[in-house]
Image (tube, rainbow, N blue to C red):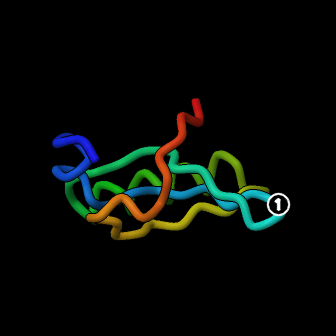
Amino acid sequence: MTYETKLRPWCIVRQLPEMKRVVVDRFRRYQDADARAQFLRRQTPSSTFVVLFSPDSAVPVEAAH
């Protein structure tokens, strides 16, 4: 785990079919992550976005841009 990942424990996860998930972005504060997740939900209503606390990098980080 990188130092930057430790500084940003809140992450937005996009849930994909077949129990797959992708970390969309990481944030330092919950409020920032939640605001971004709400924006993403409005932009792509067919997708599911969840805000998670992941300080130990339990959720694998994959680029989803």
In the displayed structure image, the side of residue 19 where residue 11 appears, left or right:
left
Lateral position of residue 48 relative to residue 63, left or right: right
Q: Residue furthest front?
A: 1
63 up-or-down from 10: above or below: above
Q: Quadrant of the C terminus?
A: top right
* Circle 1 Cα neighbour tier, 10 Å, few/some/many (<14 / 14–19 / ≥20): few
Residue 40, horizontal then vertical, whole percent? 56, 50
Q: Looking at the rendering, which quadrant does residue 21 occupy?
A: bottom right
Please give the count of numbered marks on the rendered protein. 1
Residue 20: image location, x then y, percent: 71, 59
51 up-or-down from 27: above or below: below
Q: Quadrant of residue 56?
A: bottom left
In the image, taking residue 32 as reference, residue 23 lies left or right, namely: right
Q: Position of residue 13 (x, y in %)?
A: 54, 58
Q: Residue furthest right?
A: 18
Please, what is the three-letter code of the amino acid marked with disc 1?
A: Pro
Between residue 33 and residue 9, name the one nearer to us: 9
Q: Residue at x 59, y 36 (%)?
A: 64
Q: Residue at horizontal 43%, vertical 45%?
A: 25
Q: Secondary structure at mark 1?
A: loop
Q: With respect to residue 30, does 65 lie above or below?
A: above
Front residue (pair 12, 40): 12
Q: Nearer the viewer, residue 27 or 1?
A: 1
How far from the left and from the top, in percent, is residue 23? 51, 50
Q: Would you name the residue on which mark 1 appears?
A: 17
- The answer to whether residue 62 is left or right of residue 33 is right
